[in-house]
């Protein structure tokens, strides 16, 4: 019970009612719908929930993290659709894509990003120990 209370305190201005609404919406989507519509709506609900519960109340600079998160989800979805089940080495692309993203996000420090992009990022300069891993659910 204490860990649940600690979790709720970390959410800041998110209330239990908002969490319950999110859970009920997910349950209804999974129970009442089927096929591609169900998958699309559930993915949309999860992206909206990720933004609402983790990104929205954080520093405005983390909105860029949300865009990157959505891009990573899209790339992983496309590699899964394009390469999974292929009879040759292409299957491994679908397998290793999420692992590669996990390693990059978890272990490569954010301070190398200005060097990769070729232009300085003042915000990262002032936050040299920043890690994006906490904003990527499941890492």
Image: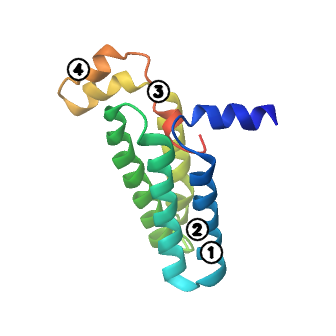
Task: Identify the image quadrant of residue 32.
Answer: bottom right
Q: Nearer the viewer, mark 3 or mark 1?
A: 1
Q: Secondary structure at mark 4?
A: helix
Q: Nearer the viewer, residue 132 or 17?
A: 17
* Residues at marks 1 and 2 touching, judged by CB atoms closer than 8 Å: yes
**C-alpha gap between disc 3 and disc 4:** 16 Å
Q: Earlier in the sequence, mark 1 or mark 4?
A: 1
Q: Residue at x 58, y 45 (%)?
A: 15
* Residues at marks 3 and 4 touching, judged by CB atoms closer than 8 Å: no
Residue ID for mark 1: 28
**C-alpha gap between disc 1 and disc 4:** 44 Å
Q: Residues within 10 Å of mark 1 (few under 14, many from 20)?
A: few
Q: Position of residue 61 (x, y in %)?
A: 31, 33
Q: Residue at x 74, y 38 (%)?
A: 4
Give the numbered dot on residue 25: 2
Give the numbered dot on residue 131: 3
**C-alpha gap between disc 3 and disc 1:** 35 Å
Q: Position of residue 13 (x, y in %)?
A: 51, 38
* Residues at marks 3 and 1 touching, judged by CB atoms closer than 8 Å: no
Q: Secondary structure at mark 1?
A: helix
Image position of 81 with respect to 74: above or below: below
Q: Nearer the viewer, mark 1 or mark 4?
A: 1
Q: Residue at x 65, y 37 (%)?
A: 8
**C-alpha gap between disc 3 and disc 2:** 31 Å
Q: Secondary structure at mark 2?
A: helix
Q: Residues within 10 Å of mark 3 (few under 14, many from 20)?
A: some
Q: Earlier in the sequence, mark 4 or mark 2?
A: 2
Residue ID for mark 4: 122
**C-alpha gap between disc 4 and disc 2:** 39 Å
């Amino acid at each position: 019970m204490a860990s649940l209370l600690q979790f709720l305190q970390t959410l800041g201005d998110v209330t239990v009612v908002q969490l319950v609404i999110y859970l009920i919406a997910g349950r209804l989507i999974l129970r009442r719908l089927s096929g591609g519509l169900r998958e699309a709506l559930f993915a949309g609900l999860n992206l909206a929930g990720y933004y609402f519960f983790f990104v929205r109340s954080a520093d405005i600079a983390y909105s860029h993290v949300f865009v990157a998160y959505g891009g990573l989800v899209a790339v992983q979805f496309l590699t899964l659709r394009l390469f999974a089940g292929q009879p040759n080495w292409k299957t491994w692309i679908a397998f290793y894509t999420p692992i590669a993203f996990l390693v990059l996000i978890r272990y490569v420090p954010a301070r190398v990003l200005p060097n990769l992009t070729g232009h300085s990022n003042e915000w990262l300069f002032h936050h040299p120990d920043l890690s994006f891993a906490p904003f990527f659910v499941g890492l």
